[in-house]
Amino acid sequence: MTTNNLSRRDFIKRSGLAGASISAATMLPLRFLQAQVPDDGILNPLAAYPNREWEKLYRDQYRYDSAFSWVCAPNDTHNCRVMAHVRNGVIVRMSEQYDVGTYSDLYGNKASYNWGNRHCAKGYTFHRIVYGPFRLKHPIVRRGWKRWADDGFPCLTKELRAKYKFDSRGTDKFDKISWENAFAYIAKGLKAIAARYSGGEGAKLLAEQGYPPEMIQVIEGAGTRTLKFRGGMGLLGVLGKYGM
């Protein structure tokens, strides 16, 4: 049979036999799978390497000068106690304290160690936010709100809401202000709310805004009882991380 009329079946059969013959001829003994001893007789070059300074590099990655505990309170409510490790005045990493089982309340009820590790990715990487290039390091105020405050906090009608961008805050700009001015504006705002909703006129305004009579009655004419000091989730994070 010549190669011109070789069938596909015969080609595959002959190819298989040829491959088996080559494999059998070139098969190495199993002793070649054993570990070979180098000419210098050193089996572990890392253990025999004269310069061991490279090990110090790995250990120095986790070296720190001091550590302190802080309470992480981002947008969740866990308030985990976290350990921050500081080197050269800079937080280099976060870690867990592993002492959840020692937590107890005033009645002696203790938490379980099963609650550890009380630490999530947000807490582990928070120091990156502290030193991040986009961290806001100064107070800012929305221009429309500042204009409203400077105008004496007039009652927000539909027209004034549009004027001060209360109905389109996302299109407004922010201005940098000092901490002193920020605290002053906050105090002015709280004072304006307390004055507006005090007495009979204040109760009338609350009723017009849809507050139920039971709530208005509990206020007893004191506008200070309409103030809400609990921040939104974003502000809770600020209070939790910096205030505590």
Image (cartoon, rainbow, N blue to C red):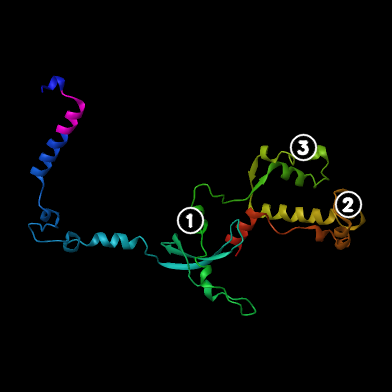
Left-right relation of 104 to 117 = right
Q: Which residue is mark 1?
A: 125
Amino acid carrying mark 1 in the image: Thr
Vertical position of residue 244 compared to residue 193: above or below: below
Name the front one of labels 2 and 3: 2
Amino acid carrying mark 3 in the image: Lys
Q: Which residue is mark 3?
A: 163
Label 3 neighbour load within 10 Å: few <14, some 14-19, many 20+? some
Left-right relation of 133 to 237 = left
Gap in angstroms between the C-alphas marked 2 and 1: 47 Å
Name of the residue lying farthest toward the bottom: 108
Q: 14 and 148: which one is in front?
A: 14
Q: Which residue is mark 2?
A: 207
Rendered-image quadrant of the N terminus: top left
Vertical position of residue 171 compared to residue 231: above or below: above
In terms of secondary structure, where does tag 1 sit?
loop
Label 1 neighbour load within 10 Å: few <14, some 14-19, many 20+? few
User: Is residue 122 in the magenta section?
Assistant: no
Residue beneath the point at 10% across and 49% down: 28
Amino acid carrying mark 2 in the image: Ala
Gap in angstroms between the C-alphas marked 2 and 3: 25 Å
**What is the magenta range?**
6-14
Sequence order check, earlier mark of 2 and 3: 3
Label 2 neighbour load within 10 Å: few <14, some 14-19, many 20+? some
Residue beneath the point at 58% across and 57% down: 74
**Image position, residue 58 (x, y; %):** 31, 60
Left-right relation of 157 to 45 = right
Sequence order check, earlier mark of 1 and 3: 1
**Image position, residue 238 (x, y; %):** 61, 57
